Every structure is written in C-alpha cells, then in structure tokens.
C-alpha cells in the first residue's frame, strides 16, 4: 500500500494531487450539514440514478439523496485511479467516502466509474436497474460538466468552450499566486467563432440527458410518477456576459428547453415530471474555471457571510420537492429555483458595489478571501479541519465494490 505525506501543489485553482483523508472528512462534514429528514420512506427506499455524482452539486445531490430522501440506486462519475506518481482524483476519494456513508446508512448504492455520455454506460446502468433494483427507477438527477462529448450515433467528438457571444468580454477576475497572495486582474475573452455555440450545446445542453431518458424508457425501467432534474445555474448580471449570455448559457437554455419537452412527455406517459434546478453560487472545480466567477463568489460570501447556502442544503431542498415532502415551487419557466437567496435586489446591489470597488489593494476588505481560498483547497481534500496533514496517508484507495 502506497503511503506518503501529501502537501498541496497547484497551478492556479488546479491541484496536482488530492488528499484521501481530507476528501473523506469533507464528505462526512457534508453529511452532517445536510438536514435530518422528518422521516425516511418505509422499506428499501426509492431508486435513484445520479449522473455526475462525485463533485460539486452532483456530490451534494448524492449525499442529500442518501440522508434526506433515503434513496438507493446508482451513482455515475468519471474519475482517475491512483498511480505510482499521482494520487487519484479528488472525486475518486470522495466516491469511496460516500460509499462508506451509504453502507453505514444501510442504503444500497452502486458506484460506477466511466463515461456517462456513452451507450456502454447507459446499458450497464439499465442492466443494474433491471437485475438489482427490481426494474424500476424513481428519480434521475443529471449533473454533468465536461469539456467534450462523443456522440454515440455519429462518433463525432464535440468540445465545449467558455466564450461570450457576439463580442469579446473584458471582466475582472480573482487570482492567487503560489503563496496564496490574491490579486484582481482584468482578462479578456474573445467571442465565440464558427460552431463554438453548437459544439458547447452538444456537450453541455440537454441532448445526453434526453438520451438517458430515452434509453431507460426504451427498456421499460421508468416507474410511475418518475421524476428527473438537471442541475443548472443562472447567476448574477455581473457574470452574465461570459456565463448566461455566453456559450455555456446557450447550453443551459437548451437544457431548459429539453426539460419542457421531457416534462410534457413524462407527464403524459407516466404522470411524471422533468425540471431544471437552478442552484446558487458555490466554489466547485467547474466554477473556478470561469472568468469572473471566483471574484464574484468571494464578494458574495463577503456580503452574505454564513447566510451563503451550501450545496448540500440546497439539494436537500430539491429532494424534498421531488419526493413531495415539500411543494414543488417553480418559476414562470418551469424551473425549481434554489438560488433566490443569492439574487435578491439587496444582495446583488451590495455585490455590484464591491465589484466596482475591487482592486488588488481593496479586495481583502471586500471579499471573504480566507473562506474562498480554503474552499478551493477543500475541493482537493486540503485545508479540511480535523485532518493531520503531517501524517502519512494511504493513496491507493480502491473504488467501492457493491456487496452481492
């Protein structure tokens, strides 16, 4: 067994290694932060499929589903195993920790590692539902962020890009040097060109979500009243040019259009429902790659402090709505809104004022930098309270294997 002392090594917001014990403790902390249910369902619990279960809001959906809704079923992610030179990805270790929690809670959750875009994975999941879970799926949560997708029908590989549409966008952004010293800089992102929009929509839009529904419905595996939610984000006007009005925003609009199509179809055939769930801002591995989002999130935390709602609490609220514990609250576009705490006029005005004033010299007084920097490290299992980072730790943690 490989054991060593791990210290954070990073290039910007990207870390080269992950800490198994820190990732394990992070997942345990998420479990503690998730509210207890009023009561769990009787029997084995509903069967859920969470696609993109190892990071960000997909991880929050998995943990909250286990604790709040008592789900069993299948969780799909795409992570890298440890090697002689590198640790596993953080999502690998988070998955192992989530599997331990599921076993402790007495929930039968099977974790699969592979390409969720592929028909091979869809077949494997369908076989498991049929053979292990009685041939009925009750819920599907879709939370996939990826740089590329290969279309199983055509074999064409599409690549997503983070670009504004129409013209270049210049925005402030937050960076840290190797010593963790913050700076506010301006970056310019050139506009989408050629088929950038279509490529991004092909990866991040609703095509694969709908393909999952088609595949499982074709196998007769969707239960009466089946409900599905794809996780999304709208965000602030401050980041709209690069996000909601950019190529990713076009993909999110396609995702929402897909939800409306699926909702009509599932309602007619199964008395079911499809929605998008618009979540609030959070520090995730995906969000830190978007220009301006790091600065915005740090300023938002500076305004809200502890009132910033963590992902696991947001997803607990989503599970309540999907399971009927709480009424399904939709906006005029048919979306579940878990971001209302972020987008009030007062909060946005306060963040906008700080954004305007933000410079390298002023940022420490305007944003919660300690919190943000810590959150970035926690994505990889570092800076987690209660973990001894001077101790050796085993890095070759196995992928969880389901019990027979």
Image (spheres, helix red, strand yellow):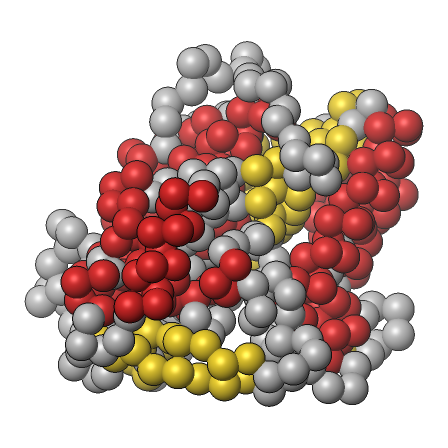
Left or right of 272? Residue 243 is: left
Using the rendered image of the protein, determine whether residue 196 is visible from the camera's viewpoint: yes
Q: How many marks?
A: 0
**Residue 312 image point, x, y percent:** 41, 40
x 55%, y 30%: residue = 319
x 43%, y 29%: residue = 67
Which of the pair 388/36 is nearer the observer? 36
**Residue 72 image point, x, y percent:** 56, 32
**Residue 56 image point, x, y percent:** 46, 54
Q: Quadrant of residue 248?
A: bottom right
x 23%, y 83%: residue = 177
x 42%, y 50%: residue = 348
Up-down relation of residue 102 to residue 122 (above or below): above
Left or right of 340? Residue 34 is: left
Left or right of 63? Residue 6 is: left
Identify the image quadrant of the C terminus.
Answer: top right
Which of the pair 318/72 is nearer the observer? 318
**Residue 174 image point, x, y percent:** 33, 74
Q: Quadrant of residue 346?
A: top left
Identify the image quadrant of the N terminus.
Answer: bottom left
Which of the pair 251/302 is nearer the observer? 302
Using the rendered image of the protein, determine whether residue 28 is visible from the camera's viewpoint: no
Up-down relation of residue 243 to residue 337 (above or below): below
Up-down relation of residue 136 to residue 110 (above or below): above
């Amino acid at each position: 067994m490989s054991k060593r002392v791990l210290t954070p090594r990073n290039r910007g917001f990207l870390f080269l290694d992950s800490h198994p014990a820190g990732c394990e403790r992070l997942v345990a902390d998420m479990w503690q932060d998730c509210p207890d249910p009023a009561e769990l369902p009787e029997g084995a619990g509903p069967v859920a499929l969470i696609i993109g279960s190892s990071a960000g809001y997909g991880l929050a959906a998995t943990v909250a589903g286990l604790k709040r809704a008592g789900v069993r079923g299948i969780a799909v992610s795409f992570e890298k195993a440890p090697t002689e030179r590198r640790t596993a990805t953080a999502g690998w270790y988070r998955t192992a920790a989530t599997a331990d929690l599921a076993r402790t809670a007495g929930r039968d959750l099977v974790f699969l590692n592979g390409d969720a875009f592929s028909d091979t994975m869809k077949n494997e999941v369908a076989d498991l539902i049929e053979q292990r879970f009685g041939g009925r799926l009750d819920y599907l949560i879709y939370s996939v962020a990826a740089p590329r997708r290969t279309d199983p029908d055509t074999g064409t590989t599409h690549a997503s890009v983070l670009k504004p549409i129409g013209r270049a966008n210049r925005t402030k952004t937050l960076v840290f040097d190797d010593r963790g010293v913050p700076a506010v800089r301006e970056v310019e992102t050139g506009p989408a060109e050629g088929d950038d929009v279509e490529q991004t929509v092909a990866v991040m839009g609703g095509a694969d979500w709908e393909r999952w529904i088609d595949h499982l419905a074709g196998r007769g595996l969707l239960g009466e009243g089946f409900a599905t939610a794809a996780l999304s984000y709208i965000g602030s006007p401050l980041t709209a040019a690069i996000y909601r009005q950019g190529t990713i925003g076009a993909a999110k609009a396609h995702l929402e259009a897909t939800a409306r199509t699926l909702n009509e179809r599932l309602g007619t055939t199964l008395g079911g429902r499809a929605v998008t769930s618009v979540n609030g801002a959070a520090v995730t591995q995906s969000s830190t790659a978007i220009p301006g989002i790091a600065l915005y999130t740090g300023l938002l935390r500076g305004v809200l402090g502890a009132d910033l709602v963590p992902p696991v609490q947001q997803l607990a609220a989503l599970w309540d709505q999907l399971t009927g514990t709480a009424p399904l609250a939709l906006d005029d576009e048919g979306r579940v809104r878990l971001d209302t705490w972020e987008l009030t006029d007062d909060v946005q005005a306060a963040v906008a004022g700080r954004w305007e004033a933000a410079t390298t010299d002023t940022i420490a007084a305007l944003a919660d930098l300690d919190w943000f920097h810590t959150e970035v490290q926690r994505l990889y299992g570092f800076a987690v309270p209660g973990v001894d980072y001077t101790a050796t730790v085993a890095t070759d943690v196995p992928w969880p294997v389901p019990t027979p």
